[in-house]
Each structure stands twice: as C-alpha cells, then as structure tokens.
Amino acid sequence: MMISLSILLLLFLVYTIVPTVFIRVCGLGITKNIKRNNRIALTFDDGPNPEYTTQLLDLLKRYKIKGSFFVVGSKVKNNPDIIKRMHEEGHTIGIHHFDHISSWVLSPFHLRKQLDMTEKAIMECTHEKVTFYRPPWGHFNIFTQIASKKFQVIMWSDIFGDWKVETCKNDLLDQLRKTSTEGSILLLHDCGETLGADKEAPRYMIEALEVYLQETIKKGTQFITLKDL
C-alpha cells in the first residue's frame, strides 16, 4: 500500500508540480515581462463579473488605458455584452479556462476542451482570433504547452494577492507603487467569486488602481495592452 501511494504521489508530482516549477523558473515558452521600457501591461483575471468588470472598464476608459483580460469561458457565456464592450474599447481578451479549474486536475483531453470551449465563447463575441492564454493559478501540467501551443502563454512579473479585501485595503496601493515601470506585467483580479477569494475584493482593487493610475500617468509611464507587444 505504501509503495502504491508513493508511486501515485510521484506520478502526481511529475504531471503537475515539476512542469509548473520548471516552466515558470526557466521561463520556458511563457512571457513574464514586456520588452519595452517605461511601459506597463495591466492584466485582469477571473472575469467577467457583471458588477466589477463594468466598473473597471469605466475606469480604464476614463484614463484612456487599454488592458488585457483573461476570462473564464462560462462567465463569457453569461455576460457576452461585457466581452463585446471589452473588444469594442480595444482591450485584449485571452483564455483563462472555461471553468476556473487548475490544470493539475485536468487530463490532456479535458485541458484541450477547456481551451477550445473558451476560445469559441470569446470568438462568438469578438469574431476575432484568440491569441493569449493564462492558466488559472499559473498551474501547468506536463501536457499544457502542447495543448496550448497555438496560444502565447502570458504569466506575470507582479502579483499582489488582491483577491482578499484586507490586502486591497491595506497593502495593494503600496505594492503597486513599488512595481517597476520597465516592462512589468501586472496581475489583478476583476472577480472575487473563485476559490479562496473575497467577493467584494474587486471593489477595493479598483479604488487602489485608480490612485495608482493617477500617480503613474503623471510620471509619464504608459500602459499598453498585450496586443501591442
């Protein structure tokens, strides 16, 4: 029994954690920074959310900023008008699985299905090819890069824990201020409905983000969408 459990654990590690660590540490086939000085790419995961994504789009429009949204396919199906608005206002829209589920628990077939279903949902709204993909939680399995080879895999240079209200209220603005303007890809969240997140967190993320945008724009930093890479 112990030998069987050890073998199962080893197989799990080889299928999940080993490729995740290897890919992320070595930067194999992924993008974590943009090669443009004095430019920042704002990226948002887990939406669309009918309340907070709309508020975020209003904020970005007010400051004439284009962002990049990695969306959950099931939420795209429920909120197509938000996706259409993102597209019309010039934002980049990428894949974040059809369900917010880790690649660690997906077979190669089910991973491919998650990608295909989300791609289809997005294209039904935008009528454009989908280029970018970010796996939920940044988790890879041993087949992820094969299954997603038609997409550019985008990770991040900075992540802030903004899925928690306390972090957004107390720490997020200071963390944003400390980020580099030398080609950073910032990861924020416009939906608090995923496992471990606080539902109200995006409200406070948006408040902190507005202050950060005001300060950073005054310094001459420009924000770009991933389509501009």
Image (spheres, rainbow, N blue to C red):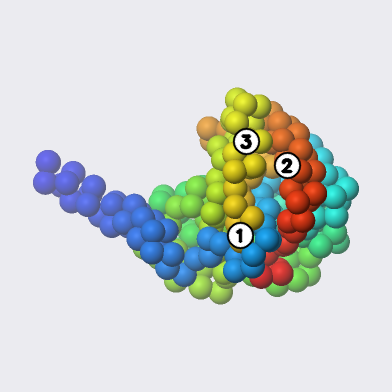
Q: Residues within 10 Å of mark 2 (few under 14, many from 20)?
A: some
Which residue is pictured at 64% across the width and 31% down the height?
168
In front of the other: 171 or 168: 171
In front of the other: 70 or 74: 70
- Quadrant assignment, res 203: top right
**For numbered disc 2, what is the local secondary structure?**
helix
Question: Which residue is most to the front?
Answer: 219
**For numbered disc 1, what is the local secondary structure?**
strand
**Residue at the disc numbered 2:** 212
> Disc 1 residue type?
Glu
- Depicted 206 relative to depicted 66: above or below: above
**Residue at the disc numbered 1:** 182
Mark 3 to mark 2 CA distance (whole Å): 9 Å
Residue 196 shows in this picture: yes
> Disc 2 residue type?
Tyr
Q: Position of residue 83 (x, y in %)?
A: 78, 55
Q: Who comes first in sequence, dot 3 or dot 2?
A: 3
Q: Who comes first in sequence, dot 3 or dot 1?
A: 3
- Quadrant assignment, res 25: bottom left
Which residue is pictured at 62% across the width and 26% down the height?
170
Query: Which quarter of the image is occupied by the C terminus?
Result: bottom right
Q: Position of residue 38 (x, y in %)?
A: 68, 61
Residue 174, disc = 3
